Image (cartoon, rainbow, N blue to C red):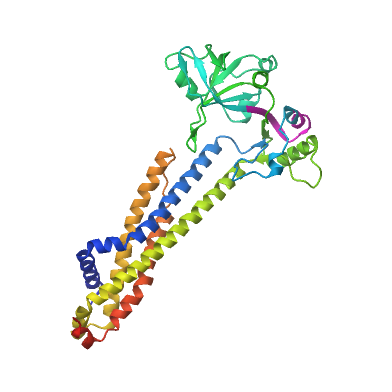
């Protein structure tokens, strides 16, 4: 007997019990599908973040009051931190020697912008920025110009529009030179900000930028600002250390106590994302492990039933010369074949789910090939491990007792 015959016999058995085979493989399908689907989403998120951050530049970091990602409730020490003020920006500008430029940014969410009869949804992010805002944050002006230092100092009512706002308010009109209203205050549009698309499903173009001093005049200063810092070439680490020391002195942080502010870099953002996706990965592995265990138990159970149902067949085969290894190979091949069938279905469904979810989140679909091979490999291993006992039981049957079986 050769392996082709063993495979054909196993395949005939599987075909003759299609529904039973399908139900048996559900655990394998769910396990493999979960791993591939989750890994596809995680990979897409990480690649999307890398692409998004690559346009900012590796010589930029941000200073803010709270951590970039807040998981659960913030501790009392973090909640009681002092707001970052423009005086902190001035301290950095006056004392830092490893810094090329520093920008202050203040923001509020939920604004509605009007132009004649056109009105945006009340979800616009309104920023107040200084003369260095665009350069430090990697934003470019596609039309018009950026506001000047004099316009900031005089608290002029001028504005820059993000692409989403431009498309909503000016579908048929050239925006530069027109006037818009924010909270009943008229602003003259002097420039348009180049589109940067979406990040994790959120648009980065749903925004309006006005001068920093104009913002504080109209909305007050009772809020923390964010500080963006661009260092000299190859001076990132030294620049961060220098800014940390300057802010600790300016904010009177006692020696030996933690900083009362956060330094955010591209690497720290990616590390935070990887920590978050690490939990998702662990959850996927647990789900996969449980599903594969359940699937393996199902495989063993159905193979034991198959041995019982085919006891007389096994006796006849042994009576005409089949050896233990032939019976063992046949049932192992059948067990592995069922698991491989379930694994391939799981791979296909996992790829489909990964692509669909990536499309829903507007992320580039990426299927890591290692997860496909891992899913198929685990399927084969489950078929082998959980198929050994039923196969050995079949191989050890006494031919005379098997022939008597009814």
In the picture, residue 311 is in which quadrant?
A: bottom left
Q: Magenta part of the protein: which range?
A: 90-106
Compared to residue 335, the image places residue 108 above or below, namely above
335 left or right of 180? Answer: left
Residue found 42% across the figure and 42% down from its top: 358
Reply above or below: 203 against 325: above
The location of residue 348, given as percent across then percent down, is 33, 52
**x, y (%) of residue 207?**
54, 25
Question: Compared with residue 118, is residue 323 higher up or lower down, i.e. above or below?
Answer: below
Seen at 55% across and 35% down, the residue is 55
Q: Is residue 235 visible?
A: no
Q: Quadrant of the N terminus?
A: bottom left
Looking at the picture, how far across and down is residue 73, in whole percent? 62, 44
Q: Is residue 95 magenta?
A: yes
User: Can residue 210 be seen here?
Assistant: yes
Q: Does residue 36 appear left or right of residue 161 in this picture?
A: left
Which residue is painted at 71% across and 43% down in the image? 77
Residue 336 screen position, x and y as percent: 32, 68
For residue 8: magenta? no
Q: Quarter-wise, where is residue 27 in the image?
A: bottom left
Numbered marks: total: 0
Give the residue at the far bottom of this rendering: 400
In depth, the one of 52 and 264 nearer the eye is 264
Please give left or right for residue 55 compared with residue 59 in the image: left
The quadrant of the rendering that contains the C terminus is bottom left
């Amino acid at each position: 007997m050769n392996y082709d015959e063993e495979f054909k016999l196993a395949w005939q058995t599987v075909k003759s019990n299609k529904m039973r085979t399908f139900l048996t493989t559900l655990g394998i399908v769910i396990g493999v599908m979960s791993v591939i689907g989750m890994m596809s989403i995680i990979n897409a998120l990480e690649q999307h973040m890398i692409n998004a951050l690559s346009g900012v530049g590796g010589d930029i970091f941000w200073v803010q009051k709270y951590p970039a990602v807040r998981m659960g409730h913030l501790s009392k020490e973090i909640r009681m931190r002092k707001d970052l003020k423009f005086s902190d920006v001035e301290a950095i500008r006056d004392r830092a020697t490893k810094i090329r430029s520093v920008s202050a940014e203040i923001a509020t969410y939920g604004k509605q912008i009007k132009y004649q009869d056109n009105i945006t949804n009340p979800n616009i992010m309104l920023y107040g920025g200084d003369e260095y805002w665009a350069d430090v944050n990697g934003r470019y002006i596609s039309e018009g110009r950026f506001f000047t230092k004099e316009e900031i100092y005089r608290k002029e009512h001028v504005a820059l529009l993000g692409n989403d706002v431009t498309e909503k308010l000016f579908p048929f009109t050239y925006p530069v030179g027109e006037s818009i209203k924010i909270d009943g205050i008229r602003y003259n549009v002097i420039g348009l900000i180049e589109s940067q698309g979406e990040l994790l499903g959120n648009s980065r173009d749903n925004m309006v930028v006005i001068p920093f001093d104009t913002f504080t005049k109209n909305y007050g200063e009772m809020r923390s600002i964010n500080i963006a810092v661009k260092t000299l070439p190859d001076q990132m680490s030294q620049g961060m250390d220098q800014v940390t020391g300057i802010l600790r002195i300016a904010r009177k942080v006692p020696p030996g106590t933690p900083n009362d502010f956060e330094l955010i870099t591209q690497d720290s953002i990616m590390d935070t994302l990887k920590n978050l996706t690490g939990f998702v990965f662990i959850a996927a592995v647990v789900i996969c492990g449980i599903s594969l265990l359940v699937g393996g138990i199902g495989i063993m159970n159905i193979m034991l039933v198959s041995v019982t149902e085919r006891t007389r067949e096994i006796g006849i085969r042994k009576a005409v010369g089949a050896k233990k290894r032939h019976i063992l190979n046949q049932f192992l091949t059948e067990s592995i074949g069922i698991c491989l069938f379930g694994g391939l279905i799981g791979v296909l469904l996992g790829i489909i789910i990964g692509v669909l979810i990536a499309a829903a989140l507007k992320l580039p679909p990426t299927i890591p090939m290692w997860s496909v091979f891992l899913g198929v490999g685990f399927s084969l291993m489950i078929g082998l491990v959980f198929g050994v006992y039923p196969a050995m039981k079949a191989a050890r049957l006494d031919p005379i007792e098997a022939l008597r079986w009814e």
